[in-house]
Image (cartoon, rainbow, N blue to C red):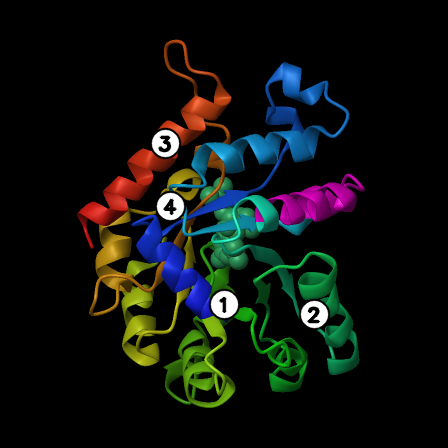
Amino acid sequence: MTFLEKLSAAWTANQSLLCVGLDPDVSKFPEPVRQQPDAIFAFCKAIVDATADLACSFKPQIAYFAALRAEDQLEALCRYIRTTYPQIPVVLDAKRGDIGATAEQYAREAFERYGADAVTVNPYMGFDSVAPYLEWKDRGVIILCRTSNPGGSDLQFLSAGGMPVYQHVARLVAEKWNTSGQCGLVVGATFPDELAQVRGIVGDMPLLVPGIGAQGGDIQATVKAGRTASGGGMMINSSRAILYAKPEGAEDFKAAARRVALETRDAINHYR
Ligand SMILES: O=C(O)c1cc(=O)[nH]c(=O)n1[C@@H]1O[C@H](COP(=O)(O)O)[C@@H](O)[C@H]1O
């Protein structure tokens, strides 16, 4: 099964375009979880269990694990999702980009070591830096296009030949790089106008859309700008707003995360 087939099945099965981002910040964990030996794994596992029927994908952010020498816990987490929820794709957020020989090793890290279904990649170094990931025909390669952060405009919005750089990326990927249907693009929810432009360029290509929740992107504007003709085609990511949702009443952190994930999924569906 290819990444796109797996993602499409998850979109349908869970009626969801919500990607639950796994950005585990130990300082924000509830005290009892923080005390556990493999606290990062335990926290993420709890979130995964609480949201697996609401998500179309999980996106672990590698830096949160690597910074604490917790790659073994990332491996365990990816393995746990693969075995317990094999229908939900894992997008490893690593934003790699390097010369081909090095990219081959990054691809092995993402797809072999972590067993990810897809990985985020930076296109700045051009096609030969992306090609090694595309050799893994059943995996997805999600390429940065129009990122959600304010500084994304510094380079991505520069005009080159009368067209902003991010539109060149969208065209390159859609017209030249995506020969096996493995590619997706990252476009921030914080820029709905650009999201609509990218959708117009790339047809039904899947888009990873971070920026709702903690970064303040508007769900209605995001869905209207980024949906395909059939009302889908996106993994709309939210990390901190779900992971560190404030418990209400008798809720624990898992119930709070589930409530926010459910509200987010349903708000997205409302505008599809
Ligand atoms: O590739 C990404 O996932 C990404 C691209 C982008 O343009 N902006 C962006 O925020 N992200 C990631 O998406 C997540 C957003 O987290 P929250 O702002 O907490 O929802 C983080 O893991 C970011 O690293």
Residue 121 in picture, x, y percent from top left: 59, 68
| CB of mark 3 near ligand 1 (< 8 Å) | no
- Bin the neighbour count of mark 1 within 10 Å (Cα to Cα): few under 14, some 14-19, many 20 and up: many
Marks 1/4: CA distance?
Answer: 24 Å
Which residue is label 1 attached to?
3
Q: Which mark is residue 260?
A: 3
Which residue is label 2 attached to?
107
Residue drawn 77% across and 41% down?
A: 70
- Rendering quarter of residue 245: top left
Above or below, 208 against 271 in this view is below
Q: Dots 2 and 4: beta carbons under 8 Å? A: no
Residue drawn 61% across and 30% down?
A: 43
Q: Earlier in the sequence, mark 2 or mark 3?
A: 2
Marks 2/1: CA distance?
Answer: 15 Å
Q: Type of residue at label 3?
A: Val
Which residue is label 4 attached to?
212
Q: Type of residue at label 1?
A: Phe
